[in-house]
Amino acid sequence: MRRQAFRFALALLLPLFIVAPYFGSLSPQKASALAGHEFQSGRIIDDGVFFNGNALSQQQIQEFMNAKVSTCDTWGSQPRGGTTRAAHGSANGAPPPYICLKEYSMSTPFKPADGLCNGHNPGNKGSAQILYEVQQSCGVSAKALLVLLQKEQSLVTDDWPWPIQYRSATGYGCPDSAPCDSEYYGFFNQVYNAARQFRRYARDASMFNYRRDRNNFIQYNPNGGCGGGNVYIQNSATAGLYNYTPYQPNSAALNNLYGTGDGCSAYGNRNFWRMYNDWFGNTFGFPFAASFRGGSPPVVVKHGQNASMSFDFQNTGSQFWKDDASALPYYPRTRLMGTWPINRGSAFSNATWPNPSRPVSVFTAVYENDGTTPAADQHTVWPGQVGRFQFAVSYPGYGIGGGIHQEHFELVQDGASNFWVPGGYAWQSIVTAEPFAAGFRGVSPEPTVRPGINDTMYFDFQNLGSQFWKDDASALSYYPRTRLMGAWPINRNSAFVHSSWLSASRPVNVFNKVYEADGVTLAADQHTVWPGQVGRFLMTVQHPTNGTPVGKYKEHFELVQDGVPNFWVPGGYAWQAVNIAP
C-alpha cells in the first residue's frame, strides 16, 4: 500500500532521528553498530519473524512504548521554532492536548473473520491492546507493527503527536500519487488494515507486483529516472514490504544509514530494517523454528483399540519444512520426536509409526496462517504456514494400567545440524481405559468417633475405565456392582463397621453422589458413574466395640467390581485417618 507524497517527505526526515535501542525484557540487541552493507535487499525480514502472532504480550507492548517516551508534552509547553509547540500546533490546525501513543485509546469497531484475520471485537481499547489483538488476529508481529508506525509517522517516539499522525498511522490507503482514502482513517483502521494487507500480499501473491522466489525490478525512488535494480525476493514478508513501499534503498542511503543519501534515495524499507534491528534485534530468525498452535483433545485408548491425536505447529523459521512424501530427497525431513527424554520410544506406539520414537513422517494437512485454509502444497510448510501432525496411538501391551499419562513430543529436522526445532514442543494426555479403572479424586476431612456418637467420611473416585459403574440401587440387576472393599489386607473387616454397611468389609453399596468430570456438577443419573464422571462413596463409621484404644487409625479401602473376574479396580485405592476419642 503506497504512501502519499507528504508521507514520502516524512520518510526523508526520519533518518535524522536516531532511535535508541530498547533494553527491556524483549529480544537481545546487536552488540556492534548496524552497517549499511548488512542490508539484504531480497531478505529484509524473515517470514517467521514478521508473521509471528505471539511476538509480544500486551504488557510488553505497553512497557516498550513507555520506555520510548518517558513524558508526554501534553500541553505543548516545550519550545518550537521561536515559540511553543502549542502555538505552532495551533497555527497549523493541531492545538493541544497532545496524546502520546502509550496513552492513546479509542473505541474500536467489530470486524468479522475473513480468512486473512480472525476478526475483532469492539470496545474502548488502548493502543497496546489494539496492537496485541491485531497481532493475534492477523498473525503479524506487534514488533513489526510498532516499527511500521514509527517508519510511517514517528508515532512510537513522538512526545507531541498530531491527530493526522493517528489518522494515517501506518500509511495504509495513502498512495504516492493521491490523497489518503478517508475510508481507512483512524488508528485502529490503519493498524488492522495494514496487518491484513500484509497477510493478503502473502496469500494472494500473484495479484501483486512484487513476489517471492523470483527476480523483481525495484526502483530506487518514485522518480523513474533514478533507476533501480533486480532483486531476488526470498520470502513473503520481504515481498510484502516492497508491495507496501515499492522502493529499495540505493548505495547513498545505505552508506549513511542514520542520515540522508542523495536526491535518488528512498528510505522506507531501509528504515524498517534499521529500526527493527535497533529495537528488537536481528530480522532473521532460526532456519528451523516453530510455534505450537494447538492439538486434539485428550485421547482415550482401550484394550484392542486405537485412537487418534494431533498437533498443529506454525513454521516461524526462515526455511520451509518437507515431509517424507516430498520430491526433494536431499532435504531434511520434519518429523515428531518422542522426548522427555529426547528420542524416547513411546509406550503408545502404533504399527503405522515409522519407529517407536517417530509417530508420523508425512504431514496430515498444511494450512495457511489461519490454521484453516488449506495450502497449495500439502507436503511443504512454508514460513508462516501451519502443519498438522496426526497419528494413531495404541493401548500399551505391557502392563500400563488405567489412568492419565502425558506423552511429550518435539519437532525435529532429521538430517539437519539443527536437530531440535526451537518452539516445536507439545504434550498431550492419553487416558488408558481398562474396562474397570479409577482415579482417586479426594476425601472428606478426618472423622472422629466417640462412644455412642458416629461420624461420616467419603471418598471420590473418577471412572477412568471404558465401562460404567452401577450401585445396588440400579435397575440393572445382572450388572456387577461397584463397591468399596476393605484392604491391607484385601477384604479386610473394619473395626469401625456400622450397621448400615453391607458387610464388615463392604462399607457402602449405593453412591452418595455422582458428578460430572468437574467433580461439582451433579450427573443426571445418580446410580450410574459413566466414564469420566466422579462417584462419591459416603459411609458412616462407628466407635469400635472391640476395645480399640483412643488414637488415630488409618482405614484403607479399594474399589471392587463384585461379580467380575477383574475383582480389584486399578487406581481405585484410598485411605483415611479415623480418630477415636474418649
Image: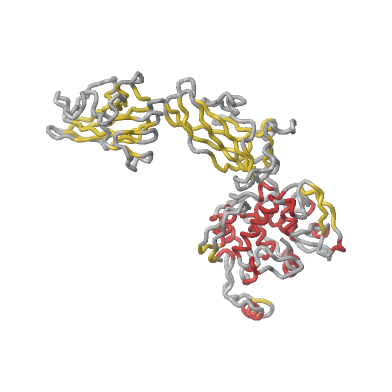
Callout count: 0
Residue 383, percent from left and from top: 68, 44
Q: Can residue 492 be seen in the rendering of this structure?
A: yes
Residue 528 vs residue 97, the one in the foreground: 528
Residue 309, percent from left and from top: 53, 34
Q: Can residue 24 be seen in the rendering of this structure?
A: no
Point 26% across, 29% down: residue: 472
Residue 265 vs residue 168, the one in the foreground: 168
Quadrant housing the N terminus: bottom right
Q: Is residue 431 above or below residue 278?
A: above
Quadrant housing the C terminus: top left
Residue 417, percent from left and from top: 69, 33
Image check: 221 left or right of 236? right
Point 60% across, 33% down: residue: 336
Q: Is residue 361 above or below residue 14?
A: above
Residue 109, percent from left and from top: 55, 63
Residue 18 vs residue 427, the one in the foreground: 427
Point 60% across, 75% down: residue: 76
Q: Is residue 322 above or below residue 25?
A: above
